[in-house]
């Protein structure tokens, strides 16, 4: 993948985030202000954002295309569900376990395919997604097989996480953790190795980066974060079934990355908000206009058309994604009096 | 023994269609270095278009084997012009993503345009069961073998005797250099998309005739994907053979092992092939572009 | 305080003049199924069935003077979206009861939320044993469950064809599990001969291996646990490989499309169902009535799931009606569970629930597909 698709920002250019205090206030206050429906949406956004932050480590930073997002998300979700429901593990143990199991599985999947260059990871992860749902169905005593698995909401340090608000706060904390972790990886030796592998694999190897090791680590870290998101999904949904983890979920992750701006963590968050809310916005818009389309407005089809269209249009006309608009807009504003 | 023969013949019948899909994947890959994740969806779109023609004009079934590829070629050219050509010069990664977007969109548009009810393909190839030494086949399954054979012969002749084959390979190896050497990269891509859509039109129509026309038809394309990995992503004829192998492996797995495992046998085969011989059984070179 | 809270809540619920979803003039109910996507064949038909029932009762002056208002959401048969839809119905639309929540997985996904709020809920499209065993206080299942239904069906088939060798082909999901357990129960009860249970993957298209295996194993009766396309393909493959076995299928695939798709291969297939068809008897009478409420295009989309949806809505309206003016969720649940022999004008056998049962075991009828008439003909 060439540099043109990716935005780089040197660590020194990191601006202080004035938005942060507002975000924290909003996160604390939202459950008091919003109804359960809106809160459910907000939680979905948080969980999706965490998952795609993880996905970005692999596809955005290391340049490896994966179609296995749904699979690792499922592994994390089922780890949470099984350990909490069947074995009564506490939350502080299940969440790391979900990340670790997902990472371990990814090493297993990645080992044979990461030696190869190119699209092979997309192909193996596609195969992995098909196989993992079969494994979940087979592991009936643990996962409930096709009957699915009801997930208990546990307590943390004695405080029960019964309410939707508690889950929302947990997910908000999870996103902060994921972003912090991703930011640290990015600035480390490892992060630079990932970028090197993406931009010039051969050169990176020559310069002493252990390419296969870097790829495997990227895959493992990425899957760990995605698995963590899956665990939160399990807590939020309270019921797991393989039907929740189909290929479309992986495609959603890909589209979020493209829309937000591949490689950028802020882009991931912008992309998530955009893609999760897009079908709702479209529904409101079409309902307002009325007509024969209105009855289909919330449907799978409109959603599918929009996902597809957004992927194609962004790749064609705005390969930098939403975050690129933001950066360019800011640059333009800064120069504004002088340039037109 | 009869059981084994039945399983193998049934496997080959399914495999002939996988093989056609495999050829469609390989044609685009060989020419442009891109895996078209919308292959099944493109085939589904063509099947629906063909079915619409046949609903209005009652034509005999065999004519579908001519009309569908023509509609396919037209569809391939249109998709190339609208979606792929604007992306020429962009990394393969981006184009692959575009095909994913295309796939999701076609699936949805089909349901919006034609609804989600499964229906019969309007023209029938005949319901008589033909017996070959105790093994029964529907006429359309027999036709699938013939179509695959013709497609293989045509692909071989095209790649062997025309400059196209060379141009396709050159473009896949290095688009920029190929352009500098005077190869019209856009034309190569357009021809590959047209040829691929034409072949997948045949696969789609044959598949729809053995099952039905429905909005989940695209899954046939996804299921045939292992065929091209087994045969070799850059080998058009290898992918056809990969399809036959895949069909037989599936049926033997179902016949002698667990039937539930049959459907993922192909994906298990992918993992095995990538571990042992990543370029597939007939593939020529490693894939380096991304 | 904590000890009193439930009591206070209970009193508030019982005496509150207006429960959620109820005003002086209106009663709001909601449901969520697939109106788009591959599941729409079932979902749209269901929606239309409810639409007929609602139009009918409103034309008759509503329930105790209150009009019924229906909110329907599309979830595309994706469990996570059913949860979102139901959450919206409960928190934004503020409905009294939920009439549909797609299939088994999606209902189980939405269940914790519905149970917490004590929402009366119906499941009429996917009568799976897991829905009512263990029992959920507020979830009422209308139909004959797949498991016990299969048991009845296999026993019926065994009586028709003594000495038969049975084989079941089931889907690898909750539906298939239930069918399989019912199948195995019948085999055990009557000491029948079974040559195997084959599981297939959801969405599978090619059944050559399954049918060949059935032939190899010498099956003479195949219980086909497919939905639509699966049953069609199994019938066609049986004809191709020359398998001389009787094919029997459950109600889930008993749709007009199945007849068309099967062609001649479908001739003689036996199906079990607890509702009839729109072209004969009580179904025909309802169809004539529906002409006043539905567009011609909608009429073509009616199928057995319209009948189940219609019956479910009638059941709910009856329970709400018996609450009088004081309609609350707790009251509707209490009235639903005391429903006894509610007559459905012959569309199904009468519906009953008890305080410890959440399935109305409807009587199965058996039909055979007559290809020349393109219709399901009752077997006596």
Image (spheres, grey):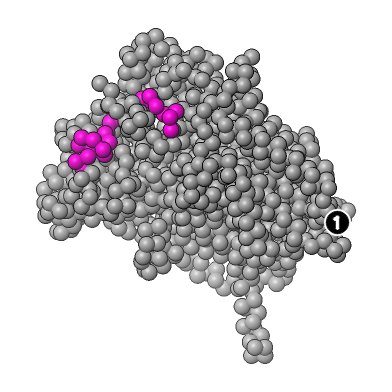
Quarter of the picture holding the C terminus of chain C: top left
Q: Is residue B173 magenta?
A: no
Q: Is residue C194 above or below residue A95?
A: above
Task: Using the image as rendered, state which of residue A249 and residue B224 is in the foreground.
Answer: B224
How many numbered discs sit on the rendered protein? Answer: 1
Image quadrant where residue A150 sits? top left
Dot 1 falls on which chain?
Answer: A
- The residue at the point 31 percent across, 51 percent down is C298
* x, y percent for residue C102: 37, 44
Query: Tag 1, which secondary structure?
Result: helix
Residue A171 in sight here: no
Q: Which residues are magenta?
A: C263-286
- Where is A254 relative to A138, above or below? below
The image position of residue B136, as x and y in percent, is 57, 23
Residue at 71% from the left image edge and 39% from the top image edge: B150
Work out whether residue A33 or residue C343 is closer to the camera in this orientation and state it: C343
The picture places residue A120, in percent across and down from the top left corner, at: 72, 45
The crowding category of the residue bearing disc 1, from other C-alpha atoms within 10 Å (few below 14, some 14 to 19, many at least 20), is few
Q: Is residue B60 left or right of residue A293?
A: right
Q: Which percent across, then down, holds residue C201?
A: 52, 32
Is residue C246 in view from this perspective?
yes
Which residue: 18% across, 50% down?
Answer: C56
Residue at the location (72% across, 35% down)?
B241
Front position in the image: C367 or A254: C367
The residue wearing badge 1 is A203
Q: Is residue A198 left or right of residue A316?
A: right
Q: Is residue C282 magenta?
A: yes
C324 to the left or right of C30: left
In this view, the residue farthest toward the bottom is A337
């Amino acid at each position: 993948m060439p540099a043109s698709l990716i935005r780089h920002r040197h660590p020194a250019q990191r601006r202080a985030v004035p938005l942060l205090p507002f975000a924290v206030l909003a996160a604390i206050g939202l459950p008091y202000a919003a109804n359960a429906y809106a809160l459910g949406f907000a939680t979905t956004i948080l969980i999706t954002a965490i998952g795609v932050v993880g996905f970005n480590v692999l596809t955005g930073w290391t340049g490896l295309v994966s179609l296995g997002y749904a699979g690792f998300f499922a592994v994390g979700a089922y780890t949470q569900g099984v350990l909490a429901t069947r074995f009564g593990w506490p939350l502080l143990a299940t969440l790391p376990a979900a990340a670790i199991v997902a990472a371990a599985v990814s090493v297993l999947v990645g080992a044979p395919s990461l030696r190869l260059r190119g699209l092979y990871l997309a192909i193996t992860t596609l195969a992995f997604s098909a196989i993992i749902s079969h494994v979940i169905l087979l592991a009936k005593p643990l996962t409930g097989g096709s009957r699915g698995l009801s997930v208990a909401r546990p307590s943390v340090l004695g405080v029960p996480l019964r309410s939707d608000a508690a889950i929302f706060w947990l997910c908000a904390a999870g996103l902060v953790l994921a972003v912090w972790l991703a930011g640290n990886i990015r600035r480390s030796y490892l992060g630079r190795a990932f970028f090197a592998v993406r931009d010039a694999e051969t050169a990176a190897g020559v310069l002493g980066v252990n390419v296969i090791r870097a790829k495997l680590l990227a895959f493992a870290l990425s899957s760990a974060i995605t698995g963590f998101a899956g665990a939160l999904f399990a807590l939020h949904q309270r019921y797991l079934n393989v039907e929740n983890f189909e290929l479309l979920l992986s495609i959603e992750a890909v589209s979020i990355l493209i829309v937000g701006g591949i490689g950028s963590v802020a882009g991931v968050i912008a992309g998530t908000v955009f893609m999760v809310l897009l079908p709702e916005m479209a529904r409101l818009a079409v309902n307002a206009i009325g007509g024969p389309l209105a009855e289909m407005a919330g449907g799978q089809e409109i959603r599918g058309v929009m996902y597809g269209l957004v992927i194609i249009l962004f790749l064609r006309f705005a390969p930098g994604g939403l975050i690129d608009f933001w950066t360019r807009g800011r640059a333009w504003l800064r120069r504004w009096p002088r340039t037109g | 023994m009869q059981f084994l023969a039945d399983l193998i013949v049934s496997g080959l019948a399914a495999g002939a269609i996988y093989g056609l899909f495999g050829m469609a994947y390989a044609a685009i890959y060989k020419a442009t270095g891109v895996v078209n994740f919308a292959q099944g969806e493109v085939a589904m779109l063509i099947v629906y278009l063909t079915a619409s023609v046949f609903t209005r004009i009652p034509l005999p079934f065999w004519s579908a084997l001519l009309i569908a590829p023509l509609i396919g070629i037209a569809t391939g050219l249109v998709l190339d012009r609208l979606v792929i050509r604007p992306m020429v010069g962009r990394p393969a990664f981006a184009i692959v993503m575009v095909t994913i977007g295309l796939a999701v969109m076609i699936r949805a548009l089909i349901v919006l345009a034609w609804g989600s009810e499964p229906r019969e393909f309007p023209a029938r190839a005949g319901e008589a069961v033909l017996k070959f030494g105790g093994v029964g086949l529907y006429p359309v399954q027999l036709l699938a073998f013939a179509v695959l054979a013709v497609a293989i012969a045509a692909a071989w002749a095209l790649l062997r005797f025309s400059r196209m084959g060379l141009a396709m390979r050159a473009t896949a190896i290095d688009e920029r250099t190929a352009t500098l050497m005077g190869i019209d990269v856009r034309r190569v891509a357009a021809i590959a998309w047209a040829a691929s859509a034409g072949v997948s039109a045949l696969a789609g129509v044959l598949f729809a005739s053995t099952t039905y026309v429905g909005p989940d038809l695209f899954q046939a394309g996804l299921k045939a994907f292992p065929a091209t990995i087994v045969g070799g992503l850059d080998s058009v004829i290898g992918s056809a053979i990969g399809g036959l192998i895949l069909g037989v492996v599936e049926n033997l797995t179902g016949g002698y092992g667990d039937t539930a495992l049959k459907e993922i046998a192909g994906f298990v085969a992918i993992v095995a092939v990538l571990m042992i011989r990543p370029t597939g059984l007939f593939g020529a070179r490693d894939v380096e572009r991304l | 305080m904590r000890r009193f809270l439930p009591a206070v809540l209970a009193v508030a619920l019982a005496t509150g003049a207006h429960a959620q979803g109820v005003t002086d003039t209106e009663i709001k109910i909601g449901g969520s199924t697939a109106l788009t996507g591959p599941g729409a064949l079932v979902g749209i038909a269901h929606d239309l069935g409810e639409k007929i029932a609602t139009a009918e009762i409103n034309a008759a002056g509503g329930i105790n003077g209150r009009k019924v208002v229906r909110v329907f959401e599309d979830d595309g048969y994706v469990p996570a979206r059913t949860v979102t839809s139901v959450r919206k119905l409960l928190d934004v639309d503020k409905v009294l009861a939920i009439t549909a929540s797609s299939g088994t997985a999606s209902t189980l996904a939405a269940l914790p939320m519905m149970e917490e709020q004590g929402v009366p809920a119906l499941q009429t499209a996917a009568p799976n044993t897991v829905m009512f065993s263990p029992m959920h206080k507020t979830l009422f299942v209308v139909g004959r469950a797949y498991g016990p239904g299969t048991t009845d069906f296999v026993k019926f088939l065994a009586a028709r064809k003594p000495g038969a060798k049975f084989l079941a082909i089931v889907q690898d999901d909750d539906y298939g599990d239930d069918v399989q357990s019912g199948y195995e129960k019948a085999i055990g009860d009557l000491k029948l001969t079974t040559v195997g249970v084959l599981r297939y993957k959801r969405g599978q298209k090619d059944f050559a291996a399954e049918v060949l295996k059935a032939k190899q194993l010498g099956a003479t009766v195949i219980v086909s646990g497919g939905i639509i396309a699966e049953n069609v393909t199994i019938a066609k493959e049986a004809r191709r490989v020359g398998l001389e076995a009787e094919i029997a299928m459950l109600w889930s695939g008993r749709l007009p499309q199945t007849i068309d798709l099967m062609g001649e291969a479908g001739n003689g297939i036996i199906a079990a169902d607890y509702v009839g068809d729109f072209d004969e008897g009580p179904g025909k009478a309802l169809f004539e009535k529906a002409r006043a409420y539905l567009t011609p295009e909608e009429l073509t989309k009616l199928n057995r799931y319209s009948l189940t949806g219609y019956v479910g809505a009638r059941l709910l309206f009856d329970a709400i009606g018996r609450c009088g003016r004081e309609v609350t969720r707790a009251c509707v649940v209490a009235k639903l569970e005391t429903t006894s022999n509610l007559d459905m004008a012959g569309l199904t056998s009468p519906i009953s629930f008890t305080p410890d049962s959440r399935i109305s075991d409807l009587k199965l009828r058996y039909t055979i597909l007559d290809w020349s008439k393109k219709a399901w003909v009752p077997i006596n």
